[in-house]
Image (cartoon, rainbow, N blue to C red):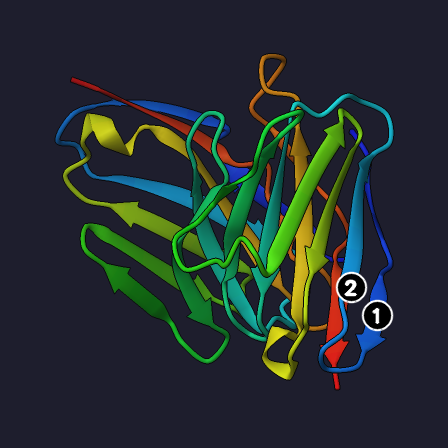
């Protein structure tokens, strides 16, 4: 199956700083990438949908100025958590899809963010 | 290593029928199990989450059950509607590792 990587896998940052998370599709071109957040023992929740070359579409309740998403190429999307606070500590997971070829999403391994 | 299997891979039913989607997992040491819906071209929508200590959860016409000891979960959809047509995914949360997803069941409800 298709491979999606995320970097870093874990990050600890201080409150008020910004953190960038990368999501890469390694062996296919992803027309669409999704960003999810999962709090411990809670459901995976969609944050935003990102199509290459266009602005991301954010789900209700997700602050677009706080969670900056860039999908500049067909193999890379980045999520930047700006001015991070402890309540942003979570597991962030991306998925990538090549809609048009199939509807299957391929998930990255996730990034565990801890804000101290 | 946790593995999640969903049966059937695809299902087509007439409108109004009740139906059951099946999910099985190999490692019973789980925190919770989640059911998602995926519409073509869209992100996942969370439907139900069952904690490992629970046996079922209900939301509207949806009922999900969990039998952790046997490694099985079912998603029951009552009085199916064409708007229910989508791919349904189950995913297992085993703690510090990412969710492990099944490959999904593609449901078509025919009017």
Residue toward you, B13 or A104:
A104
Subunit under mark 1 = A
Q: Is residue A35 left or right of residue A45?
A: right
Q: Are marks 1 and 2 on the same chain?
A: yes
Question: As displayed, is residue B59 above or below residue A34?
Answer: below
Q: Position of residue A12 (x, y in %)?
A: 83, 76
Q: Is residue B92 left or right of residue B72?
A: right
Kindly state the secondary structure of the residue where label 2 is placed: strand
List the residue tagged with mark 2. A19
Question: Which quarter of the figure is the C terminus of chain A placed in?
Answer: bottom right
Using a 10 Å C-alpha cutoff, classify the residue at mark 1 as few (fewer than 14 neighbours), some (14 to 19) or many (20 or more): some
Mark 2 and mark 1 in contact (Cβ < 8 Å)?
yes
The residue under the point 39% across, 42% down is B21
Farthest residue to the bottom: give it: A116
Q: Position of residue B86 (x, y in %)?
A: 38, 30
Q: Is residue B105 visible?
A: yes
Question: As displayed, is residue B86 above or below residue B25?
Answer: above
Q: Name which of mark 1 and mark 2 comes first in the sequence.
A: 1
The residue under the point 68% across, 64% down is A82
Subunit under mark 2 = A
The residue under the point 71% across, 78% down is A16
Question: Which quarter of the figure is the N terminus of chain A placed in?
Answer: top right
Using a 10 Å C-alpha cutoff, classify the residue at mark 2 as few (fewer than 14 neighbours), some (14 to 19) or many (20 or more): some
Q: Position of residue B12 (x, y in %)?
A: 32, 21
Q: Is residue A18 left or right of residue A7?
A: left
Q: Position of residue A22 (x, y in %)?
A: 80, 48
Q: Nearer the viewer, mark 1 or mark 2?
A: 2
List the residue tagged with mark 1. A11
Residue toward you, B97 or A99:
A99
């Amino acid at each position: 199956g298709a491979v999606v990587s995320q970097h870093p896998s874990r990050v600890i940052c201080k409150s008020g700083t910004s953190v960038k998370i990368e999501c890469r599709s390694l062996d296919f071109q992803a027309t669409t990438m999704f960003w999810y957040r999962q709090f411990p023992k809670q459901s995976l929740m969609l944050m935003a949908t990102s199509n290459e070359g266009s602005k991301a579409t954010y789900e209700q309740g997700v602050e677009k100025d706080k969670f900056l998403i860039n999908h500049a190429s067909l193999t890379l999307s980045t999520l930047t958590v700006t001015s991070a606070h402890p309540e942003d500590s979570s597991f962030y997971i991306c998925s990538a899809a090549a809609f048009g070829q199939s509807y299957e999403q391929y998930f990255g391994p996730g990034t565990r963010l801890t804000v101290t | 290593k946790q593995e999640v299997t969903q049966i059937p891979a695809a299902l087509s039913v007439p409108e109004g029928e009740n139906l059951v989607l099946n999910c099985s997992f190999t490692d019973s040491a789980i925190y919770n199990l989640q059911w998602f819906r995926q519409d073509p071209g869209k992100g996942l929508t969370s439907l139900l989450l069952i904690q490992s200590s629970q046996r079922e959860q209900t939301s509207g016409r949806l009922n999900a059950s969990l039998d952790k000891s046997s490694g099985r979960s079912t998603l029951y959809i009552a009085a199916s509607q064409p708007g229910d047509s989508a791919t349904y995914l189950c995913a297992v949360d085993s703690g510090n590792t990412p969710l492990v997803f099944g490959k999904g069941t593609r449901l078509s409800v025919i009017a």
